[in-house]
């Protein structure tokens, strides 16, 4: 019997009528065409790779799209290999970037990796997930690095759209960024990947992984690309930096409120990519969003929290009542003194004074349900005490 990385050959998987059907659901491309179907028809357990550079600690629903697909492969009997790019994160993936990505320190990368993997197991089967760190093989002797780098031309690496656009705009591209797809591709060599998953913005990197494998005499992996989940604005990619995200560790109430805010037009995509369900044509948007929110909360929170979140949402946004429990904030100053609103908002809601001023200017701050204007930034302490200050749609404090 052969081996993979010193382990016994993976088990054979009993044949099914159409092993590719559910695994291709929701995918954009399976490349090269027909190869994944042939691999699945062989009946052997495949090694399914996903590489993550831990540049942020938390998983949001955009990540869940690909994790769901990995879980589909696990249920079909295949082995998921989740690679934490602790080494490649030092470079920064140039995909979709118009400028150099800031480099994180090793301690932050390690902390992010630990948090990310813990959260990934909210979706993945821990027993069928192999966690690897690519520093295991990329922290290589310099002669091995030269041997890897000399296999590819600069012209081939500059074919990617990101680099072409930056060159046309006279924006800098570092030599390390050019090496990024080579190093990421070597991950596929190290773990002997049969299939690699990623978003459509990763197509160049995933295909290049095939080139790296073939340069070492291996069969090139298949690649499966998944759609990019739009964020809460319905337009841009879901991203924590853009503030248009739903995190898997978000409070159930926040989850419910955020999901109720998504545009109607992206509901079918959310149903297919997050729930694996067809969207029922003609379903009222409000009903559809409520169902979506309940199901997602049920997946990531204990039983009963989705009902409580929906009840709190209705109390606040349908009946326009205050939340059942409102935290308290004690105002500073003496009786008869004035309170500077930006400073009070900053302290009560843990934000900067400039952010507080911006919210006031935009009409995003209310006092007992009435919008506070930006023309009066100082109010008498007596006029504030005992009233409820609200920022945005879901944040409240009772002023004392």
Image (cartoon, grey):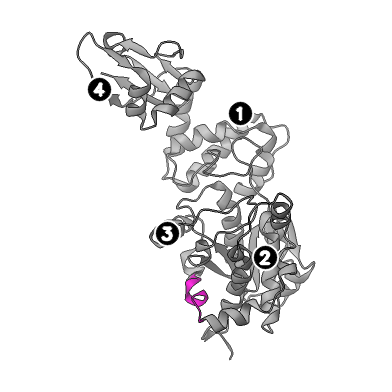
Q: Earlier in the sequence, mark 3 or mark 4?
A: 3
Q: Earlier in the sequence, mark 3 or mark 1?
A: 3
Q: Nearer the viewer, residue 292 or 27?
A: 27
Q: Earlier in the sequence, mark 3 or mark 2?
A: 3
Q: Is residue 332 above or below residue 105?
A: above
Q: Label 3's element?
A: loop
**Other-residue count near label 4 (Cα within 10 Å), few / some / many at <14 / 14–19 / ≥20:** some
C-beta proximity under 8 Å, tags 1 and 2:
no
Disc number lying in front (1 or 2): 2
Q: Which residue is mark 2?
A: 206
Q: Is residue 248 magenta?
A: no
**Other-residue count near label 2 (Cα within 10 Å), few / some / many at <14 / 14–19 / ≥20:** many
Q: Which residue is mark 3?
A: 105
Disc number lying in front (3 or 4): 3
Q: Residue 326 at x, y = what percent?
A: 33, 25
Q: Residue 85 at x, y = what percent?
A: 51, 65
The quadrant the C terminus occupies is top left
């Amino acid at each position: 019997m052969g081996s993979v990385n010193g382990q016994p050959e993976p088990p054979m998987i009993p044949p099914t009528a159409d092993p590719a059907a559910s695994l291709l659901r929701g995918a954009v491309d399976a490349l090269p065409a027909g190869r994944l179907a042939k691999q699945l028809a062989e009946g052997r357990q495949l090694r399914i790779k996903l590489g993550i550079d831990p540049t942020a600690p938390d998983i949001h629903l955009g990540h869940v799209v690909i994790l769901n697909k990995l879980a589909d492969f696990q249920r079909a009997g295949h082995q998921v290999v989740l690679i934490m790019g602790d080494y490649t994160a030092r470079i920064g993936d140039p995909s979709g970037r118009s400028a150099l990505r800031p480099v994180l320190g090793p301690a932050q990368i390690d902390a992010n990796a630990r948090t990310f993997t813990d959260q990934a197991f909210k979706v993945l089967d821990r027993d069928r997930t192999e966690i690897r760190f690519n520093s295991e093989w990329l922290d290589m002797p310099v002669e091995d690095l030269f041997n890897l780098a000399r296999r590819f031309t600069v012209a081939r690496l500059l074919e990617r759209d990101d680099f072409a656009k930056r060159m046309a705009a006279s924006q800098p591209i570092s030599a390390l960024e050019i090496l990024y797809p080579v190093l990421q591709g070597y991950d596929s060599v190290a773990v002997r990947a049969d299939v690699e998953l990623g978003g459509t913005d990763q197509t160049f990197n995933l295909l290049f992984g095939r080139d790296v494998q073939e340069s070492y005499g291996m069969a090139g992996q298949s690649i499966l690309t998944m759609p990019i989940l739009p964020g809460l604005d319905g337009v841009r990619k879901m991203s924590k930096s853009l503030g248009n995200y739903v995190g898997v560790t978000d409070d159930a109430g926040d989850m419910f409120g955020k999901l109720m805010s998504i545009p109607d037009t992206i509901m079918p995509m959310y149903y297919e990519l997050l729930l694996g369900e067809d969207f029922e044509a003609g379903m009222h948007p409000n009903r559809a969003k409520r169902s979506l929110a309940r199901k997602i909360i049920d997946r990531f929170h204990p039983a009963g929290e989705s009902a409580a979140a929906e009840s709190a949402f209705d109390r606040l946004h349908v009946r326009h009542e205050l939340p059942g429990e409102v935290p308290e904030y004690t105002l500073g100053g003496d009786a008869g003194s004035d309170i500077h609103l930006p400073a009070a908002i900053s302290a009560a809601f843990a934000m900067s004074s400039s952010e507080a001023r911006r919210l006031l200017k935009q009409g995003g701050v209310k006092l007992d349900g009435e919008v506070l204007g930006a023309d009066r930034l100082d109010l008498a302490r007596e006029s504030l005490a005992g009233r409820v200050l609200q920022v945005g749609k879901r944040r409240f404090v009772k002023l004392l």
